[in-house]
Amino acid sequence: MVAAIGSAAIQEMLAQMRSAVDQTRNSTGAVPGVARPLANTNKPAKSDFAQALKTHLGEVSNIEKPANSLGKRFALGDIDVNLSDVMVSTQKVNIALQSTVQVRNKLASAYQAIMSMQI
């Protein structure tokens, strides 16, 4: 059974946390172990998810091309290609695709969670 936390309890926890931070401040006003913000933090750094995803898909494609080539060469009877090389390269492609699908699934799940939030 999960107990609901009231706003008063949250405010009390925040006050305790602020008090603990104030007690640990050194003479310079910095909190030990906590990085100080950069001098120019007016603009947040942009991270373009679409560009990162496109780059990752390009990398997966670059892994897939040699694997397909090895598979075709093995199927055509090229004696320079080992079955183990074909299987390893195929598994690398499989893992790369699975990781891409998992990222897509997490993104879709996060999108659905955001869309189901009430304003």
Image (cartoon, rainbow, N blue to C red):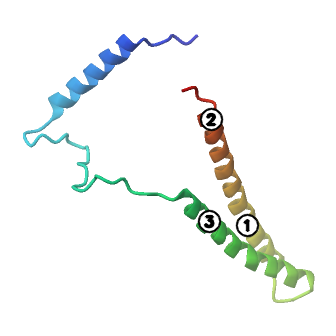
The residue at 20%/24% (across/down) is 19
Which of the two labelled residues, at mark 1 and mark 3, occupies the earlier sequence position? 3
Residue 114, image x, y percentages: 59, 36
Relative side of 13 to 119, left or right: left
Q: Quadrant of residue 21?
A: top left
Q: Residue 71: image x %, image y %?
A: 84, 77
Q: Which residue is mark 2?
A: 115
Tell me the CA gap for discs 1 and 3.
16 Å
Q: Measured from the top left, where is residue 94 in percent x and y?
A: 75, 62
Between 17 and 82, the one lying in front of the other is 17
Cα separation between marks 2 and 3: 24 Å
Q: Amino acid at mark 3?
A: Lys
* In the image: residue 30, left or right of residue 6: left
The disc label shown at residue 93, or none: 1
Q: Earlier in the sequence, mark 2 or mark 3?
A: 3
The quarter of the rendered structure image containing the N terminus is top right
Which residue corresponds to the image point at 26% horizontal and 44% vertical from the top-left? 34
Task: Identify the residue shown where x is 36% and y is 53%.
Answer: 44
Depth check, mark 2 against mark 3: the one in front is: 2
From the image, which quarter does the C terminus lie in?
Answer: top right
Q: Which residue is mark 3?
A: 54
Mark nearer the N terminus (1 vs 2): 1
Q: Nearer the viewer, mark 1 or mark 3?
A: 3
Other residues around mark 2 within 10 Å, as few (<14) / some (14–19) / many (≥20) = few
Q: Residue at x 65, y 71 (%)?
A: 58
Q: Judging from the image, what secondary structure is the residue with disc 2 in? A: helix
Considering the numbered disc 1 on the image, is that residue within a helix, a strand or a loop? Answer: helix
The amino acid type of the residue labelled 1 equals: Val
Distance (Cα) linking label 1 and label 2: 33 Å
Compared to 21, does 80 lie above or below?
below
Name the amino acid, label 2.
Answer: Met
